Image: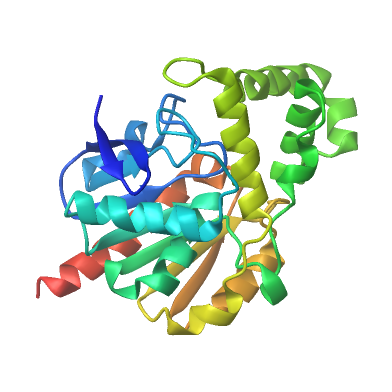
């Protein structure tokens, strides 16, 4: 399994595919053992995709906390340097979009073109839903609440009218949210998730985004209650060269609307093609 020493961590990473280099930063609780992940999707057919387990998660080390958003950004920058992977295209999803913002504010030369998906800038531009407030719920209650806020169409009326679909969706969410024990002790994994959510609660880049000048595609689901539409408009407004587009779906719009990844691919490849002319 590929690990590399980065700052104070042994970081687990994978690289798959061929084409222009794309650095993909995943969301809260991300673990590359969870399937499907970015390597199971269409991006690897047209890009050389690098992704990794962030500190405290998956098969990456879980040092003592607290963690900061700066820690996650510096980890990402050090990984790119260690693998000689920059400059590159950059895509950050949800929490990964927050890390991507922090990374770009510190190292704007790292990326040539950027996708920020279902994320928020924090501060005056609006924060994403405070997921850390759900940590003390039972696993089932937390899974149900995550479904409800991930897609606002799954409201109380929908749960009452679709009991079989709701039960199936809940079981999928519970399986997806299980803690892996391979390579990381369960207590370390839970601690890493809690430390990540604590760092996430302090995310705020809005006052620094004016310095991030490369083309950026801001995209989200119309029914997202975690990174709601108002946050997307505010994020777009804070960036000098941003385009905003909404898709059919909620926080998981990337798998709910097939047009989303096609549009992301086209956005990223337009820059590559232009650079070759």
- Whether residue 132 is visible: yes
Rendered residue at 57%/35% (across/down):
192
Rendered residue at 84%/39% (across/down):
155
Colour option used: rainbow
Q: Is residue 227 left or right of residue 77?
A: right
- Residue 179 found in image quarter: top right
As displayed, is residue 155 above or below residue 236?
above
In this figure, what is the number of numbered marks? Answer: 0
Rendered residue at 71%/68% (across/down):
126
Residue 167: % across, % down = 76, 18
Viewer-proximal residue among 192 and 253: 192
Residue 173: % across, % down = 65, 25
Residue 261: % across, % down = 41, 49
As displayed, is residue 5 above or below residue 237?
above
Q: Is residue 68 left or right of residue 182?
A: right
Rendered residue at 60%/22% (across/down):
187
Classify the position of the N terminus by image quarter: top left
Residue at the left extreme? 277
Q: Is residue 177 left or right of residue 225?
A: left
Viewer-proximal residue among 107 and 43: 107
Viewer-proximal residue among 136 and 171: 136
Q: Is residue 33 left or right of residue 49?
A: right
Residue 181: % across, % down = 51, 15
Viewer-proximal residue among 154 and 125: 125
- Residue 132 found in image quarter: top right
Classify the position of the C terminus by image quarter: bottom left
- Whether residue 94 is visible: no
């Amino acid at each position: 399994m590929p690990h590399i020493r980065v700052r104070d961590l042994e970081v687990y990473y994978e690289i798959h595919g061929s084409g222009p280099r794309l650095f993909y930063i995943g969301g809260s609780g991300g673990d590359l053992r969870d399937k499907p992940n970015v390597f199971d999707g269409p991006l690897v057919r047209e890009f050389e995709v690098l992704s990794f387990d962030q500190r405290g998660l998956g098969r990456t080390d879980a040092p003592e906390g607290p963690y900061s958003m700066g820690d996650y950004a510096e980890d990402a920058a050090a990984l790119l340097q260690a693998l000689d992977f920059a400059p590159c295209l950059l895509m950050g999803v949800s929490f990964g979009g927050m890390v991507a913002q922090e990374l770009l504010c510190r190292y704007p030369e790292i990326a040539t073109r950027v996708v920020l998906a279902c994320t928020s800038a924090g501060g005056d531009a609006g924060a994403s839903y405070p997921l850390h407030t759900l940590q003390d719920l039972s696993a089932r209650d937390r899974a149900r609440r995550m479904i409800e806020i991930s897609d606002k169409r799954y409201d109380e009326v929908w749960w009452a009218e679709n009991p079989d679909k709701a039960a199936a969706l809940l079981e999928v969410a519970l399986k997806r949210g299980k803690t892996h024990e391979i390579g990381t002790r369960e207590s370390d994994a839970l601690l890493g998730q809690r430390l990540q959510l604590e760092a996430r609660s302090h995310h705020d880049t809005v006052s620094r985004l004016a310095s991030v000048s490369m083309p950026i595609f801001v995209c989200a689901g119309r029914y997202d209650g975690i990174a709601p539409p108002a946050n997307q408009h505010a994020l777009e407004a804070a960036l000098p060269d941003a385009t905003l587009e909404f898709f059919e779906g909620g926080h998981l719009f990337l798998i709910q609307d097939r047009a989303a990844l096609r549009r992301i691919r086209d956005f990223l490849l337009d820059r590559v093609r232009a650079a070759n002319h």
